[in-house]
Amino acid sequence: MRSLNYRYRGIDRTTDVLSFSQREGQFAGLHPQLLGDIVISVPTAARQAREQKHSLSRELERLLVHGLLHLLGYAHEHDPAEARRMRRKEGLLCKRIAR
């Protein structure tokens, strides 16, 4: 995961989830029905689950929702208001999955 994060984002550290849009870049129109790919680091998810005192399954669901929101255009890196908006949406979607 660290090498993917460095290769595609220029950040030389591991991360929990990466999203790769198929609606941007050179091949954006190739498969318009596909949003993209989501890569989740299971070791990082397991550590985060232990830290948050919830199951690995719950953490994987959260990371999948987080990655999906990125594919839908949400961002949190540079705008605190957008980060709050994304966190709220993530919480709402995770609650719906948990039902």
Image (tube, grey):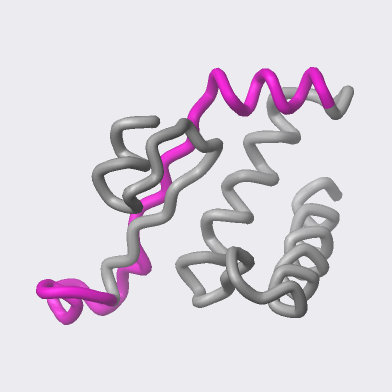
**In-image side of 3 versus 88 (left or right):** left
**Residue positioned 19% across, 77% down in the render:** 28
User: Residue 48's x, y, as percent?
Assistant: 72, 27
Which quadrant of the figure has residue 20? bottom left
**In-image side of 16 versus 79 (left or right):** left
**Residue positioned 19% across, 72% down in the render:** 31
User: Residue 89's x, y, as percent?
Assistant: 76, 69
Nearest the eye: 52 or 79? 79
Which quadrant of the figure has residue 77? bottom right
**Residue positioned 27% across, 67% down in the render:** 22
**Is residue 33 located in the magenta-colored stretch of the structure?**
yes
**Is residue 42 located in the magenta-colored stretch of the structure?**
yes
Q: Quadrant of the N terminus?
A: top left
Nearest the eye: 9 or 88? 9
**Residue positioned 88% across, 23% down in the render:** 53
**In-image side of 1 versus 8 (left or right):** right
State whether residue 59 is above or below residue 97.
above
Q: Which residues are magenta?
A: 24-51
